[in-house]
Amino acid sequence: MTTTSKLLTNLQRAAAATNLRSSTLPSSTIKSATALLSTTGGTVHTLPDLSYDYNALEPIISTETMTLHHSKHHQTYVTNLNVGLEKYDAALSKALSGDSTGVSDMVGLEGMIKFNGGGHVNHALFWDNLCSKDDSELKEGVLKTMIEEKFGGLDGLKAELGAMSIGVQGSGWGWLGYNPKTSTIECMTRPNQDPLQATTGLIPLLGIDVWEHAYYVDYRNVRPNYVNAIWDVINWDVVEQRLIAAQAK
Ligand code: MN3
């Protein structure tokens, strides 16, 4: 919830406490409070730093790809998410003041927030589940045990998630996720920037970006070569930490 919408909720509570309806609050009160607290608008979300250098994933993912993908593509999702949230905040304020056009505005912004919010969330997960070739090792532990139980071993996971990721039609993502209902891990794909958890209930453990911008510089149009190579730069320690955190929820 944004600071503005939190404030509006508090105003509504105050109104209720004094037997007033929120629609009877003076609009000047709402407007001035909104103006006061919207000073952070536009920069709420920022591009996260990488924990490694742009050249750290060479030769699997080139410095050029990493530079463009992180500083241009991911930055664009962040910028547009902030724009969308600011508009959504204004729409929410209108809706909460009793103006039904605000509700319509909110619904109209959902696609923009799903796309750019998903793009931000997905890429933040992606950067963290990659690491240099030297640091990529699936060690003994709960993750390795669950991969063996579900897929018969790491090669089984690579085969299933690899084939599913290569098979994504158009742009999208391949995921290994934790299913809290069955307490198991499973593979899934999502189109566009649809965030895994919000659209499937699976908690994301490992993401593979199969948008062309993720591999075109290095592998041209040959997505299978990119997906088959990316296994060399997976940060299994991070994937296991996510699994342990998901199991503890
Ligand atoms: Mn991408």
Image: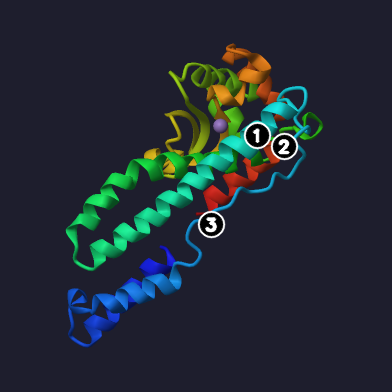
Q: Is residue 42 above or below residue 59?
A: below
Q: Report the mark closest to the observer, 3 or 1.
A: 3
Q: Are the residues tagged 3 and 1 within 8 Å (C-beta)? A: no
* Label 1 sits on residue: 144
Rendered residue at 31%/74% (across/down): 30
Cα gap from disc 3 to disc 2, whole angstroms:
41 Å
Cα gap from disc 3 to disc 1, whole angstroms:
39 Å
- Left or right: 120, with 236 as reference point: left
Rendered residue at 65%/32% (across/down): 68
Can you name the residue that lies furthest to the top here? 222
Label drawn at residue 43: 3
Residue 163 visible to the viewer: yes
Rendered residue at 27%/48% (across/down): 107
Q: Are the residues tagged 3 and 2 within 8 Å (C-beta)? A: no
* Label 2 sits on residue: 140
Residue closer to the observer: 204 or 107: 107
Pointer 1: residues within 10 angstroms few (<14), some, or many (20+)? some
Q: Is residue 34 above or below residue 29?
A: above
Residue 181 visible to the viewer: no
Residue closer to the observer: 61 or 40: 40
Q: Are the residues tagged 2 and 1 within 8 Å (C-beta)? A: yes
Q: Amino acid at mark 2?
A: Glu
Number of marks drawn = 3
Q: Looking at the rendering, which quadrant does residue 66 occupy?
A: top right
Question: Disc 2 on helix, strand or loop?
Answer: loop
Q: Is residue 234 above or below residue 1?
A: above
